[in-house]
Image: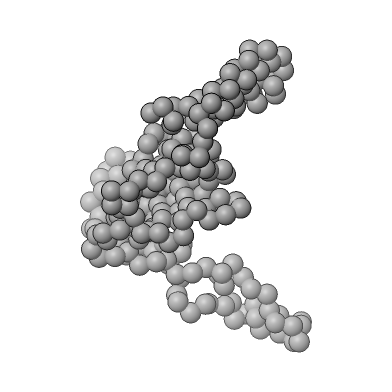
Amino acid sequence: MFRRATTLLRRPLNAAASKRFSTDIPVESATDASFVEAWKKVSPHIDPPKTPLSYLKPRPSIPSSLPTKLTVNFVLPYSSQLSSKEVDMVIVPATTGQMGVLPGHVATIAELKPGVLSVHEGNDVTKYFVSSGFAFIHANSVADVIAVEAVPLDQIDANLVQKGLQDFTQKLNSATTDLEKAEAQIGVDVHSALNSALTG
């Protein structure tokens, strides 16, 4: 087994580069000719249904040189905060810690935890508090941030955060069922993250 591992490690680099990805598809939409032919025999007056391959788009090309800007899309279930905005850097509150994303970042998927999302554009920094979600960083210097809930940090009332933290801490201490404890713990976690975002 060790010998096989060493031979695999000594493969030429161009062999790895020539490996196809599942999303590497031709620009023209490919159709299964035998399926279409069989469909036409059964239902000649109805167009054949689209297959998943019909909906795939070709993988975006990876630029040969490092881009100077990062394109960010930041969306919520009910609105779009940023759409194709070119920025210098984004810092997302990943569950593994704060993650800075610059142009040319390696492709990554990160789960978001309650915390501050910072969008850096020159000397301007816009901060949002996000409750949870995901960040998808693509190899072509595009970052898609999808959050369940987000609000600009300057619109948060520190007094209400303190009151909410006290209320949920009381609920956690007086909770009797597992459901009550879980709901109270979520409230404590979110309000603690809000509090540290405002004070930090």
User: Looking at the figure, which quarter contains the N terminus?
Assistant: top left
The image position of residue 180, as x and y in percent, is 69, 21
Instruction: Indicate whether 199 appears above or below 120.
Output: above
Quarter of the image where one finds residue 79: bottom right
Please report the residue visible at 56 percent of the width from the left and 50 percent of the height from the top.
76
Residue 120 in sight here: yes
Quarter of the image where one finds residue 45: bottom right
Please report the residue visible at 57 percent of the width from the left and 78 percent of the height from the top.
31
Residue 155 is left or right of residue 59, and the answer is right
Front one among 150 and 146: 150
Quarter of the image where one finds residue 62: bottom left
Front one among 1 and 145: 145
Residue 189 in sight here: no
Please report the residue visible at 70 percent of the width from the left and 82 percent of the height from the top.
47
The image position of residue 86, as x and y in percent, is 36, 59
The image's colouring method is: one colour
Instruction: Indicate whether 134 appears above or below 186.
Output: below
User: Looking at the figure, which quarter contains the C terminus?
Assistant: top left
Instruction: Indicate whether 139 appears above or below 98.
Output: below
Please report the residue visible at 58 percent of the width from the left and 18 percent of the height from the top.
166
The image position of residue 19, as x and y in percent, is 35, 62
Instruction: Indicate whether 132 appears above or below 56.
Output: above
Residue 85 is left or right of residue 122, and the answer is right
Q: How many marks?
A: 0
The image position of residue 51, as x and y in percent, is 62, 70
